Image: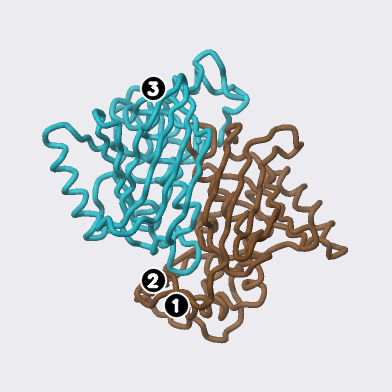
Chain colours: A cyan, B brown
């Protein structure tokens, strides 16, 4: 719902969770005590291939990495935890202190809170000139709705993540105001699909983004979405 | 996206995953080999309180349990894995064999695939006469979007689960066709909120459901949703 400029922040920030692991409780010694310090990055980039990736996902990933060679496309890195200086700035400028509590130390990005292969496996690539993001997505067995298919909420989640990223690359810190999702066909569990997200229009602080999901061969349309995102007012804290 | 009559099925079915644990891989001996047999239930009902529940969630749960005493309201049990005979019937009647693969053995209901307190903690109560469902929901730290707030996808997920359950209690096996979600305010991480879902209209196989999310005291409106669900045609397999 709320987006911070994750891709850009992550590329320059300093996340500090254990490599590939969950954030430790606040009461434990170690990395959690060193939040927002100037230490080096040690977190794993989850947008890179791992052994759970299907052949389809790996092939598509390789195709888009080739597109990155002339810099028209860029891969967006992705981490479980967000402890960069910029995220701290978000807290300083937008987050009312009443929402800052010990639980936040345990916070993990929802789409990266599963072990490899069980949940959301995905890589996003952006094309700044075309104001587009392509997300290559494989939904694991812990995202099940009816037997054999992804839960509608899991589909909505990867749509929100992709459209939100499209808006924030254009507008900075944004918030999802509306998602209107048409589910055309159920998506088989553990299959690979492709999300295409496009910034359609900007009106003041409103960013209109559309998104569709297709099969790898492009023949099956799984869903269509219209999204509206609002750029946060830097003079107003969230309440 | 796809709904099977989970609450009702679960109450009469025979899920067979290890108590409170993940489903074992297909290659392992043990429970996974005995799917769809007639063994007794051993799975934990995750709609009952656990130590991660907040005071707010426990108080609301107790209030609704009192409402259940005259049978006007009913608590809907909820499990990680679905291996009841009725789920097998779903596979037989609606699921094309091409979608049935080894991965399905590992499948877990998305909203129950986290350890206690980290993800979706919720209990649903239905009122058949009013065609309503109330879902008491606490979103854990692994559902984070921006620091301190729930991911929009996590909100969409609990909305889809609640509205879908409302439709299926009226219509049987349904599929989400559309979700139009207005996000009014961000939901603080680890807070307790209340979803109110209502069946508004039925037109043939179309079930129209609305849903809002409020704070526990009812003073803050977090989101409003219009959902459309389609009852599956028993003569057509999903493709």
Q: Chain of mark 2?
A: B
The residue that mark 1 highlights is B32
From this viewpoint, which residue is outermost toward the right? B70
What residue is shown at x 62% (from left), y 54% (from top)? B163
Count of residue discs:
3
From this viewpoint, which residue is outermost toward the bottom? B38
Q: In the displayed structure, does residue A120 sit left or right of residue B146? A: left
- Quadrant location of the C terminus of chain B in the rendered image: bottom left
Q: Do marks 1 and 2 share a chain?
A: yes
Q: Alpha-carbon neighbours of circle 3 within 10 Å: few (<14), some, or many (≥20)? A: some
Q: Chain of mark 3?
A: A
Please tell me the numbered disc located at residue A85: 3
Q: In the displayed structure, does residue A219 sit left or right of residue B210? A: left
Mark 1 or mark 2, which has the lower sequence index? Answer: 2
Q: Quadrant of residue B10?
A: bottom right
Q: Is residue A204 above or below residue B157?
A: above
What residue is shown at x 29% (from left), y 45% (from top)? A123
The residue that mark 2 highlights is B25
Q: Position of residue A200 (x, y in %)?
A: 37, 32
From this viewpoint, which residue is outermost toward the front? B204
CA–CA distance in space, label 1 to label 2: 7 Å
Residue in the foreground of this view, choosing between A184 and B91: A184
What residue is shown at x 70% (from left), y 48% (from top)? B196
Q: Secondary structure at mark 1?
A: helix
Residue in the foreground of this view, choosing between A122 and A231: A231
CA–CA distance in space, label 3 to label 2: 41 Å
Answer whether labels 1 and 2 touch (C-beta < 8 Å): yes
Q: Position of residue B5 (x, y in %)?
A: 61, 69
Q: Secondary structure at mark 2?
A: loop
Q: Position of residue A159 (x, y in %)?
A: 42, 45
């Amino acid at each position: 719902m709320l987006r911070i400029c994750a891709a850009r922040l992550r590329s320059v920030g300093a996340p500090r969770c254990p490599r590939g692991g969950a954030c430790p409780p606040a009461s434990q010694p170690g990395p959690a005590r060193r939040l927002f310090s100037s230490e080096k990055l040690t977190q794993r980039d989850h947008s890179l291939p791992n052994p759970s990736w299907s052949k389809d996902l790996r092939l598509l990933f390789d195709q888009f990495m080739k597109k990155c060679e002339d810099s028209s496309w860029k891969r967006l890195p992705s981490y479980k935890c967000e402890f960069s200086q910029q995220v701290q700035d978000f807290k300083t400028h937008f987050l009312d202190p009443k929402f800052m509590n010990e639980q936040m130390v345990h916070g993990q990005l929802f789409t990266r809170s599963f072990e490899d292969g069980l949940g959301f496996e995905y890589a996003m690539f952006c094309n700044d000139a075309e104001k587009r993001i392509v997300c290559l997505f494989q939904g694991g067995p812990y995202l099940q709705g009816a037997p054999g298919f992804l839960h509608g909420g899991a589909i909505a989640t990867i749509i929100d993540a992709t459209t939100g990223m499209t808006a924030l690359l254009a507008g900075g810190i944004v918030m999802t105001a509306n998602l209107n999702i048409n589910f055309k066909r159920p998506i088989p569990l553990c299959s690979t699909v492709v999300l295409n997200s496009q910034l359609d229009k900007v009106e003041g602080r409103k960013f209109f983004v559309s998104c569709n999901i297709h099969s790898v061969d492009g023949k099956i349309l799984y869903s269509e979405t219209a999204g509206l995102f609002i750029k946060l007012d830097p003079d107003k804290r969230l309440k």
